[in-house]
Image: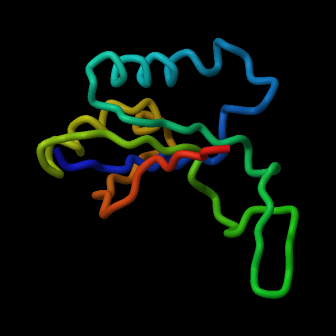
Amino acid sequence: MPQFAILIYADESLHAVDAAEADLEEHDQHANDLSVSGTMSLAFALTPRADAVSIRRDSTDAEPFVKADQFVAGFYVIEAPDLDAAVAIARLNPATRTRTGGVEVRPVHSGGITANDD
């Protein structure tokens, strides 16, 4: 079945190291619902952008790569029969109900989890 990446955009990630469980509850429930349904194959929440380090040709900066009002706060990969079905699933993400957030759905071209044999 085709895979689709759901990129979550927000004005800040809720997943700080010291985040309160209550702040994450709705997002965690959404992830749990997708996991239980067998739709989601992997998910990653990113820490706040203050933790970012950007690397360019001649520099390394302790800041995000792109200065923008919204940025990728996390992403997950789902399996769906087609783009329309993936969009319907993505509409359920809590970020779509915020004033400044949203999600982007992109078909996955190739790749997957790689094993480290260390």
State which quadrant residue 74 falls in: top right
Residue 1, how many percent across, how many down?
16, 44
Q: Is residue 115 above or below residue 41?
A: below
Residue 66, how many percent across, how many down?
67, 69
**For the point 33% across and 61% down, which residue is it?**
110
Q: Is residue 64 left or right of residue 32?
A: right
State which quadrant residue 35 falls in: top left
The image quadrant where one finds the C terminus is top right
**For the point 68% across and 32% down, which residue is it?**
15
**For the point 50% across and 50% down, which residue is it?**
114
Q: Is residue 93 left or right of residue 25?
A: left
Q: Is residue 88 above or below residue 54?
A: above
Q: Is residue 21 left or right of residue 25?
A: right
Q: Is residue 88 above or below residue 84?
A: above
- In this rendered view, identify the residue nearer to me: 12 or 32: 32
Q: Is residue 1 left or right of residue 56?
A: left
**For the point 45% across and 50% down, which residue is it?**
7
Q: How is the image coloured?
A: rainbow
Residue 6, how many percent across, how many down?
39, 47
- In this rendered view, identify the residue nearer to me: 69 or 80: 80
Residue 68, how many percent across, how many down?
65, 64
Single out the residue that lies furthest toward the top.
Answer: 22
Single out the residue that lies furthest toward the front.
Answer: 117
- In this rendered view, identify the residue nearer to me: 114 or 10: 114
Labels in figure, total: 0
